[in-house]
Image: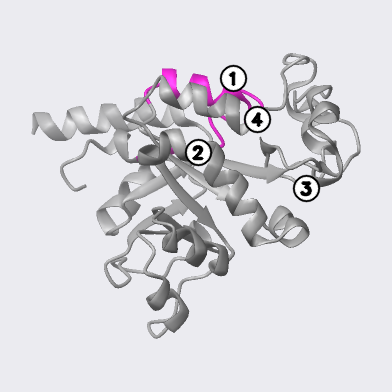
């Protein structure tokens, strides 16, 4: 991707999360409208096995109301307002908690955009890998070419790879050179916490590197020059603008 414009190497982390409640269809739509070529969202499973787009295991932070996502029926989740009150106050009250079905319809309007779909560990632990993966795969079948399934859980990624899905591993530390599990998994992407990166050039056995979370354009550009392919950011609009300006300056030289 060395010839790809810098701004097009940004991933909208949970949509346009700096300005809109994360993982809502509103946040994803606005990230797409801002020009995002890559979007990352999180999915969980409701008590009645409906796949929903949500990061936390609990609804308190995003909805201002206690409840375990995996213990609630889809109808109960649909009644919640996903407006992130501690961050946005009442500005987005009434914004609904997204389902994978709703996300899929939005994805189909932007067929050239790649979506990284993170399978959250809370739902894996409660429902099991096979049930969660089956529900996710069924909901994403129509947009399969746009999807990379990612997770901290390596066994579920192995199962996904065996079914032919593109996969990306997520971890908070830089992998050892002899990480045999990761070598055998052969993920296309490796998502890493930016705080865990070593100094110097960045590469790990040909895997495409992505990092989270970056809100500074200078840092993002420096990471790309060091070998990172994709940079996740909550501030997709602001970061795209800043990197586009830098790209224009570089192209003018």
Q: Earlier in the sequence, mark 1 or mark 3?
A: 1
Q: Residue 229 carries which label?
A: none
Return the residue nearer the eye: 16 or 221: 16
In the depicted view, which residue is nearer to us: 186 or 210?
186
Q: Which region shows up in magenta?
A: 10-35
Which residue is denoted by mark 2 in the rendering? 140
Q: Marks 3/4: CA distance?
A: 15 Å
Q: Earlier in the sequence, mark 1 or mark 4?
A: 1
Task: Answer with left or right where residue 109 lies relative to residue 73.
Answer: left
Disc 4 marks which residue?
A: 99
Q: Do the residues labelled 1 and 3 touch (CB within 8 Å)?
A: no
Classed neighbour count for the residue bearing mark 1: other residues with Cα under 10 Å, few (<14), some (14–19), many (≥20):
many
Mark 1 and mark 2: span between their CA atoms?
Answer: 19 Å
Instruction: In the rendered view, tell whether residue 106 sits above or below residue 44.
Output: above
- Between discs 3 and 2, the one toward the N terminus: 3
Residue 235 visible in image: yes
Q: Nearer the viewer, mark 1 or mark 2?
A: 2
Of the two numbered discs 3 and 2 in the rendering, the one whose residue sits closer to the viewer: 2
Q: Earlier in the sequence, mark 4 or mark 2?
A: 4
Q: In which quarter of the image is residue 93?
A: top right
| Residue 99: quarter of image | top right
Residue appearing at x 48%, y 51% in the figure: 149
User: Which residue has dot 1 on it?
Assistant: 26
Mark closest to the chain's N terminus, 1 or 2: 1
**Rendered residue at 45%/27% (across/down):** 107
Disc number lying in front (1 or 4): 4
Label disc, if present, on residue 57 of the rendered structure: 3
x%, y% of residue 186? Answer: 37, 69
**Helix, strand or loop for disc 4:** loop
Find out whether residue 21 is within the magenta segment.
Answer: yes
Left or right: residue 124 versus residue 165 is right
């Amino acid at each position: 991707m060395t010839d790809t414009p810098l701004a097009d190497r940004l991933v909208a982390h949970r949509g346009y999360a700096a300005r809109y409640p994360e993982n809502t269809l509103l946040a994803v739509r606005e990230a797409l409208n801002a020009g995002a070529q890559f979007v990352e969202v999180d999915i969980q499973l409701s008590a009645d096995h409906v796949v929903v787009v949500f990061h936390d295991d609990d609804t308190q932070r995003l909805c201002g109301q206690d409840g375990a996502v995996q213990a609630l029926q889809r109808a109960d989740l649909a009644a919640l307002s996903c407006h992130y009150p501690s961050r946005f106050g009442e500005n987005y009250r009434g914004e609904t908690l997204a389902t994978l079905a709703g996300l899929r319809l939005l994805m189909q309007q932007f067929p050239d955009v790649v979506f990284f779909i993170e399978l959250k560990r809370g739902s894996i632990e409660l429902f099991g890998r096979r049930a969660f993966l089956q529900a996710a795969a069924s909901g994403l079948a129509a947009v399969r070419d746009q999807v990379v399934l990612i997770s901290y859980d390596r066994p579920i990624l192995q199962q996904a790879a065996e079914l032919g899905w593109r996969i990306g591993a997520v971890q908070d530390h830089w992998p050892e050179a002899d990480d045999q599990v990761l070598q055998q998994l052969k993920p296309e992407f490796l998502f890493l916490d930016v705080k865990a990166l070593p100094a110097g050039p960045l590469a790990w056995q040909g895997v495409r590197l992505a990092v989270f979370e970056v809100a500074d354009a200078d840092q993002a550009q420096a990471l790309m020059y060091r070998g990172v392919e994709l940079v996740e950011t909550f501030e997709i609009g602001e970061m795209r603008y800043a990197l586009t300006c830098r790209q224009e300056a570089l192209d003018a030289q």
